[in-house]
Image (tube, rainbow, N blue to C red):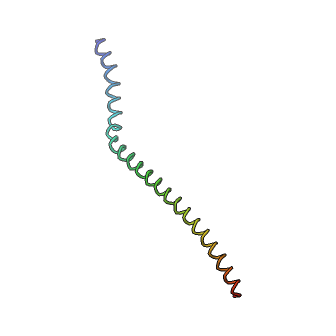
Amino acid sequence: MLKWIVLALVLVPLVVLALAVRPVLARLPGLRRAALKLKLRADEAASLREAAESLQQRAEGLQGQLETTEQRLALIRSRRGG
């Protein structure tokens, strides 16, 4: 009789633990896919951020060229008297 009580005290928690762990284990493949998608999106966001920074630098350079061109144009116009 004592053997059955001890056996029940050991087996019942193990069965409850197995039942609790089963849904988590069933979700693991989906969680892995989600983690991979998240990593891909993070990499894509980093790439887009680098491209945006590059475009920002190019725009600043073009802005400087535009200012120089406007100054030269103003100088040419002032020399011509117009």
Taking depth in this image into account, of 69 and 47 the one nearest to the observer is 69
Locate residue 32: give its quadrant: top left
Rendered position, 81 above or below 15 = below
Rendered position, 28 above or below 80 = above
Horizontal arrangement in the rendering, residue 43 relative to residue 61 (left or right): left
Extreme-top residue of the structure: 2
**Tally of numbered tags:** 0
Q: Position of residue 30 (x, y in %)?
A: 34, 45
Locate residue 9: give its quadrant: top left
Q: Position of residue 5 (x, y in %)?
A: 31, 16
Rendered position, 6 above or below 13 = above
Taking depth in this image into account, of 39 and 79 the one nearest to the observer is 79
Task: State which quarter of the image contains the N terminus.
Answer: top left
Residue drawn at x 43%, y 51% is 43
Taking depth in this image into account, of 31 and 24 the one nearest to the observer is 31
Q: Position of residue 41 (x, y in %)?
A: 42, 52
Residue drawn at x 66%, y 82% is 76
Residue drawn at x 35%, y 46% is 33
Task: State which quarter of the image contains the C terminus.
Answer: bottom right
